Image (cartoon, helix red, strand yellow):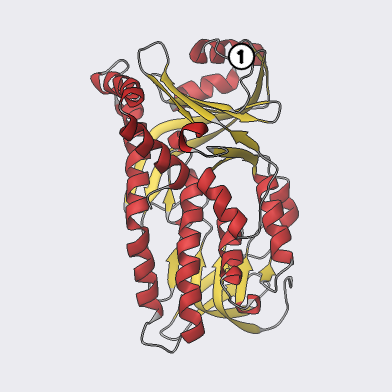
Amino acid sequence: MSETTTDMEEHFDVAICGAGPVGQALALLLVKRGMDGRRIALIDAKSIDQAMLDARSIALSFGSGQLLASAGAWPISATEIYQIHVSRRGHFGRTLIDCTEYGLPALGYVARYGKLVAPLHAALQATSVVVKRPMQVTAINESKETVTLNLADTTTITAGIVVQAEGGSFGDQAEKSRHRDYRQTAVISHITTSAPLPQRAFERFTEQGPLALLPQEDGYALVWCVRPDTAAHLQELSDSAFRHTLQSAFGDRLGHILTTSKRFTYPLGLNAQAQATARTVTIGNAAQTLHPVAGQGLNLGLRDAAVLARLLAEYFPSATAAATPAEVLQQFLIQRDSDRSNTIRLTDSMARIFASSADGSLLQSLLGAGLGALDLIRPAKKMLAEQMMFGSR
């Protein structure tokens, strides 16, 4: 694998902007499908060392594990999820999704971001993919015949197709066609408890939004979605006061909350637009940023990468054939429409009920009743479980 070059200009079949998990997976899947790694450029502003130090918690579905395995980047250092307990705090309505009901070894996994990118990076090192990092793209100019990328070191590369896989977070993005500010903030921490239930994840709906505890290492990754003023208040609390407040919100199903790590916050919203020009396309967070209520953001992006890799690998060996790059990219949008639409609809509906409905509203009560009904209506429960594990197929 080559690193940053000082050549004045290089040409590639595919240039991928963004070497996070989605961009890395796309590059690997293109090579696995037969493309010459020397014809693929992967560009990212961060060094790989910076990426590996990122300790954020990432939820991966079982289907994403299969996808990473097909890319040659599995196993990873992660905690398996065998069960997901979904409930509404203080009200009727709960369901338990268990991997044994579907004949699977796990529903999903929880990993540190750095632990996820490390095996992807290792797999890329065994290929001839041209990796340029740390390197910033300063301008992208598309013409009829090619796309030109100007880089921060004053060099220039060209590509037949450019994939934008660097989306950033909701608070930093330009507004897309489907945009909704939920006026919620996620409070992030790592906690330990006195009576953990190994491999069981919890999604508990509170009056202000979902509270998720995902099994990770010696405890749980916390994602607590609340209104911005509540998040500010939670940030100001001492550790002991925060533990007491969290205990009250979650309950004692895991015993006493013993420790909490440093807390971080970020704003939540929907920002999505399926977008392609004649030679450029967006995937992952660059195409859709979602509420974390169902933990589907990265998983949806990895499914984007899998479909795009198949289409591009089929196109480039015979790029002089009747199909044009624009037609290939439009076919990608068509093939991804159902999965994207269903996943966005699911997360948006669940987020809006708690972000915009009054405490104790009819909508919130109906959601609680619906959770209870899932255990009684097995086809509906199976449909929800399969959407979370694999997406729409």
Percent from the top left, x then y, of residue 3?
74, 70
Looking at the image, which is closer to me, 167 or 123?
123
Q: Which residue is mark 1?
A: 243
Left-right relation of 339 to 54: left
Looking at the image, which is closer to me, 356 or 105?
105
Furthest residue in direction left, as rendered: 362
Residue 53, quarter of the rendered image: top right
Left-right relation of 11 to 307: right
Residue neighbourhood size for the residue with mark 1, other residues' Cα within 10 Å, grouped as few (<14), some (14–19), many (≥20): some
Residue 373, quarter of the rendered image: top left
Instruction: Answer whether residue 269 is visible to the viewer in this image.
Output: no
Looking at the image, which is closer to me, 328 or 97?
97
Q: Please count the marks in the image.
A: 1
> At 43% across and 82% down in the image, what residue appears?
143
Left-right relation of 324 to 264: left
Q: Secondary structure at mark 1?
A: helix
Furthest residue in direction front, as rendered: 103
Q: Quadrant location of the N terminus?
A: bottom right
Q: Up-down: is 82 above or below 113?
A: above
Left-right relation of 383 to 57: left
Percent from the top left, x then y, of residue 46?
67, 57
Instruction: Answer whether residue 357 is visible to the viewer in this image.
Output: yes
> At 74% across and 65% down in the image, what residue appears?
125
Disc 1 residue type (three-letter): Arg
Percent from the top left, x then y, of residue 4?
72, 71
Q: Up-down: is 151 above or below 83?
A: below
Percent from the top left, x then y, of residue 389?
47, 42
